[in-house]
Amino acid sequence: QQASSPSASASASASAAHAVVVPAVPAADVATDSGDALPIAEKRDEILKAVEENQVVILMGETGSGKTTQVPIYLHHAGYTSKGVIAITQPRRVAAITVAHRVAQELSSQVGDLVGYSVRFEDVTSAATKIRFATDGFLLRDCVRDGDFSRYSVLILDEAHERTLATDMLFGLVKRLLVAGKRPQLRVIVMSATLDPSKYGGFFRSAGVVPLFGGARGRGAGGVGCVRIVRIPGRQHPVEIFHTPAAEEDYVEAASITVMQLHVEQPPGDILVFLPGQDDIEALQQLLEDKRVKLDRLRRHPSPSDPLPPSWQSSSLDMLICPIYAALPVDQQVEAFRPTPPHTRKVVLATNIAETSITLPGIRYVVDSGKVKLTTFNPRTGVEMLLRQDVSKAAAMQRSGRAGREAPGQAYRLFTEADSQGLADQTPPEITRADLAQIVLQMRAYGISNEESFPFLDAPKEGALDKAVKMLQDLGALDNRGLTDLGHRLSGLPVVPMHGRLLLDSMEFGCLEHMLSIVALLSTENVWHHTLTSERKADKERRKRVSTNFRRLAHPDGDHLTLLKAYHRWNEVSDKVGFCKEHGINHHALVRATKIREQLQGLLVRLLGDVDMAAHTQAAVGKDEQWVSIKQCLAKAFFLNAAKLMPPTRKYRTEYGRQEVHVHPTSVLVERQSLPQWVVYNDFFQTGVGKKLYIKTVTAVEGEWLVQFAPAKFTAAYVKD
Ligand code: ADP
Ligand code: MG
């Protein structure tokens, strides 16, 4: 569809909607690699003074102004690292890792030395680490052990505007700590890219904290215990924004057309494309690679039957495509940060990670799908889903702004101007959208028995806390007296409570080794390539071969078992990459799963004392007893995710929430003539198109097992009927 042609809309300037994001600041020099050239540099002394005089400092500044990389360095040079560790939280693991690398480099150090990072399943720190970048989730889990943050001299809660669940929880915990007056020397810095600091300021100043925040303590207007707001001046160049004249149905296709057109028609400058998730990124990468190859060929061998459009002929830039998303291996993520080679245009395909948490140099053009993937929890049904949704106005603004960091830029939005008017102003905070079970579990482990009284920046939805408590009770993590032994153990595992139960229950079923593998595999993303659009577009022959191979590998009783089978086979074969290619498996996911498995095993040992893996793993790989014990363990740990077949249809009804669902087409179960009467599932979601509800990663269980292992929920009469 021509609607996506950016230059068409751009040249028809009368109809093209465009606006300027932020007025240009004159004489802004192009950012260099030196921290001194960053906008934050002129505020260095003010920031250090504010931190010295106030316990809480709120630092506002545009993305790319230098907050994340420079503030820890300033504090380090000002001596804060001699009093303890500086922690900087990031909502995303990619950001924590890349920023740690950057800061280590600026301080001429190695990651894991002075500067380190800690993310789920990966802790690259040492006794020498004084600047620790961590995901907010990691720090939140960590503080169960060290509730006073005693090892830290400064806590920096970065990307506060993202309002992730974990950052919000840290806000509350820090406030409680400050109110209690336990750590008068601790400094807290809240950093954010948006322009409304009053919310955070008000939160820390609000009622309960009067004794501590009441005003001057002999230091003029400041004083320890006060809140200070520091703003970093913006240095943003104007960005022209273009919208598509008509709505785009396929934003991946539209993005590919837009990128190619920009590539061949516009002056040099890198392109940043925002997409909701990995699958779309991989699909677009494939489309662009194809087009790039074709362009190359036509440039070298012009064909009269398939001529290059005249405007394309003048361009001779090469195209370098760099994806960046959470599940991408780190060595590939850093590609996006490398300087663009000469005569080349870099095209970065990113999720909303590139919105505010990382800054890529050289971007002059932004292409925005207008979509983002968000978790959404419905407390009525107790179901959390990952849904593709429209971005907020604030997010769209941030995305467009990425084009104007170094010079005037252009942003191409793959949605209409009318649609942009209809966007929500802000993305609702995650705490109002997410499943709170894991958070409540952690709060209890932390010693907070009454969640209702917790100082939330924004309160969870009505009923969401009750639902979480109820779920934890059903799981056996909570009882009338509070956290149970099981609950304590679950809180020490960095996985969702149900996966934690799989691990803990597996010992009794003699399948610990196998369950470690399954939980590790469930903790990685996209083990199967066939779920990706790019793979569906692969050539027919290959697709057929891969799907035949996959069928041979599949276990008819379910996806958990199939995952395990694939993992075992992968461990056995010598040509692992080849094996993955021939079976439609994501090799990186299995490598990652292996690392996660090791971590989980180590955590279990720490939690339970020495665990004799062999003793808890009776049935060998491939034996029938093995499959039975795994299925029984799944039935016991996942009874809350049980679903019952609704004959004569092939639909199921979930026990929790009573939803009618389809088994996702990627499940091995859909191949079966007759479907099992009972299944348990790992994921529950709704697709954008058609709004059909699906369960994914599904395995057959016996109704009797549910009665046996969850008698409070299932009666014999009920499961038979
Ligand atoms: P903020 O946190 O305010 O958004 P950052 O401190 O992340 O800003 O980035 C400041 C500047 O440092 C960026 O504009 C960019 O020029 C540079 N920078 C940050 N990370 C990297 C990196 N990994 N590689 C190259 N340059 C980087
Ligand atoms: Mg930052």
Image (spheres, rainbow, N blue to C red):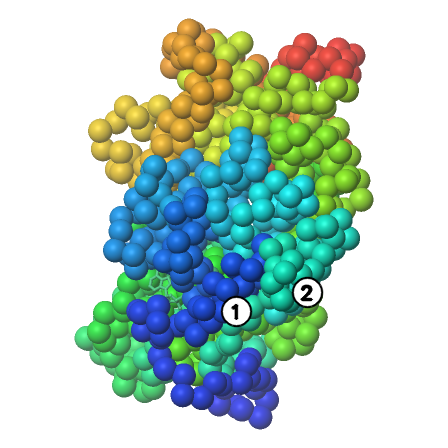
Q: Which mark is residue 502?
A: none
Tell me the kind of residue under disc 1.
Gly
**For residue 646, which quarter of the picture?**
top right
Is 127 placed left or right of 494 in the picture? left
Q: Which mark is residue 198?
A: 2
Tell me the kind of residue under disc 2.
Ser
Image coordinates of residue 352 in percent, x first then y, are 51, 59
Image coordinates of residue 563 in percent, x first then y, are 44, 29
Secondary structure beneath dot 1 equals loop
Name the residue rendered at 69%, 60% in the picture: 215
Mark closest to the chain's N terminus, 1 or 2:
1
Q: Furthest-left residue in view?
A: 300
Q: Which mark is residue 61?
A: 1
> Is 87 rendered above or below residue 415?
above
Is 638 placed left or right of 325 in the picture? right
- Quadrant position of the C terminus in the picture: top right
Cβ at disc 2 under 8 Å from ligand 1: no
**For residue 516, which quarter of the picture?**
top left
* Viewer-side residue, 191 vs 339: 191
Specify whether residue 536 is in view: no
**For residue 27, which quarter of the picture?**
bottom left
* Viewer-side residue, 95 vs 420: 95
Name the residue rendered at 44%, 31% in the picture: 521
